[in-house]
Image (spheres, rainbow, N blue to C red):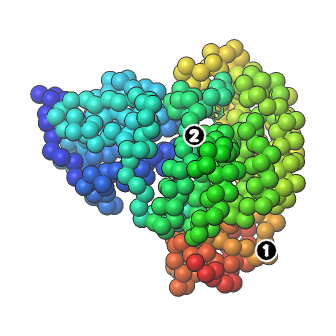
Amino acid sequence: MSKNQISRPDPKKFRIKSFGCQMNVYDGERMFEMLIDQGMTDAADGEEADLVVLNTCHIREKAAEKVYSDIGRLRKKDGTSPMIAVAGCVAQAEGKEISRRAPSVDIVVGPQAYHRLPELITRAKTGKKALDTDMPAASKFDALPTRGKQARPNAFLTVQEGCDKFCTYCVVPYTRGAEISRPWIDLIDEAKALVDGGAKEITLLGQNVNAWTGQDDNGKTHGLDGLIRALDDIPGLKRIRYTTSHANDMTDALIAAHADVGKLMPYLHLPVQSGSDRILKAMNRSHTTESYLEILHRVRNARPDIALSGDFIVGFPGETDADFEDTLSIVREANYSQAYSFKYSPRPGTPAATMDDQIAPEIMDERLQRLQALLNEQQHDFNIQTIGRETEILLERIGKLDGQLVGKTPWLQSVHVIAPGLKIGDMVDVEIEAAGPNSMTGRIRERIAA
Ligand code: 5AD
Ligand code: SF4
């Protein structure tokens, strides 16, 4: 008898592995809370899970293929397979194909349907395959348990999902669907619950977070700046961040918030992707290098110390040496505190995948290396500039050394400190003593009242 027909016991212990972006981390946390709410327990380190949820990413081929090698490794000690659920964007994009390629998968659940995971588990228990990649009109968020105690002081809050921009390389409009903004009141309530649960910092998430729009209790329409200002009023919340933004949705009002909302951190993730206007057009980015730089100028006028982050793709179809040099030029001009850069990866169903002039892998490798060398240099320079500065950090995790904790500066740099008597979630004033390419060390000056 094949595994498909065997009914299985109730899964009691589960494990969730999230890959990819912060929105997946958020979804993973919501699934975690839901399974706990169902009476299941998190499988501790070294313990065998009866249910493994792989919360997957489809943005580049490597990430998407990883799920299949991971599935292959999921075996219990007795040789049987745990119940396996594939969630996230690979589930949405590949659907039934997943069970065909990996027959040990029991459940396939898309990013808009994971609130139905308990029903899917019930179905899988009967030995049947369970697939749900619906994008229902009703919000999954309404069906999820309210937020409780937080494992981390830096919480994520998805405020916006999906994308209507259709950049020609990107799968997001297909895997996450059309742009939707979650309602004002739901977000205020969730933010308050996160703070009650111990969060000190909230990062507002969305594929196009700065396109968020909603109406407050009085029916007044706001953009993301209005939501940020409302969150600024929550006592106990110390820091607000948001990611990721599109240049075209960077409104004057949001830029102004960087000047006058005390809790809004001086950090902006604003991808440009390429420094060549010809390539930006082929990418359907709908902004130019000039309009991007002009936005940066205004943001820096509002908040001179803002740390800039971005995303880059090298080797988009048709990218010439001159186009790539233009990317290096915009990096020099914009000056990043850190950034993410990727080799172009053709994604099935996207317009760029069938464009002429796909770039050879060795050219992409060489360009990526040169771009990353420049970005690393800028990151290191940014870190070096903070040596000697006194700043506040939020302690977020335990470090490798005895008594060491790691916190984040307002500019999102990691700082290692020896912190006797302090704990994760504390905010402390530190003096930055040394800076490496990726992180810094500091000395504690004073603890800030909670
Ligand atoms: N290939 C390479 N990088 C991609 N990204 C999105 N789609 C692709 C692709 N097909 C990058 C973009 C985006 C980030 C999240 O991932 O830089 O901003
Ligand atoms: Fe993808 Fe472009 Fe939308 Fe970002 S803006 S999610 S890169 S389609």
Report the quarter where the N terminus lies. top left
Quick check: 12 above or below 197? above
Query: From this viewpoint, which residue is outermost toward the front?
Result: 218
Quarter of the figure with residue 283: top right
Quarter of the figure with residue 448: bottom right
Judge by depth and name the residue closer to the eye, 155 or 147: 147
Whole-percent x and y of residue 325?
A: 84, 34
Query: From this viewpoint, which residue is outermost toward the left?
Result: 1
Does label 2 or label 1 sit earlier along the sequence?
2
Amino acid at circle 1: Arg
User: Which label number is shown at residue 302?
Assistant: none
Secondary structure under tag 2 reads: strand
Q: Which residue is mark 2?
A: 181
Whole-percent x and y of residue 83?
A: 25, 41
Q: Is residue 214 visible?
A: yes
Secondary structure under tag 1 reads: loop
* Left or right relative to 389: residue 406: left
Quarter of the figure with residue 351: top right
Judge by depth and name the residue closer to the eye, 305 or 371: 305
User: Which label number is shown at residue 389?
Assistant: 1
Judge by depth and name the residue closer to the eye, 168 or 81: 168
Amino acid at circle 2: Ser
* Left or right relative to 183: residue 284: right
Residue at position x 82%, y 24% in the image = 278
Q: Quadrant of ligand 1?
A: top right
* Left or right relative to 381: residue 450: left
Judge by depth and name the residue closer to the eye, 5 or 216: 216
At label 2, counting other C-alpha atoms closer than 10 Å, the crowd grade (few under 14, some 14-19, many 20 or more) is some
**For discs 2 and 1, the disc positioned in front in the rendered view:** 2
At label 1, counting other C-alpha atoms closer than 10 Å, the crowd grade (few under 14, some 14-19, many 20 or more) is few
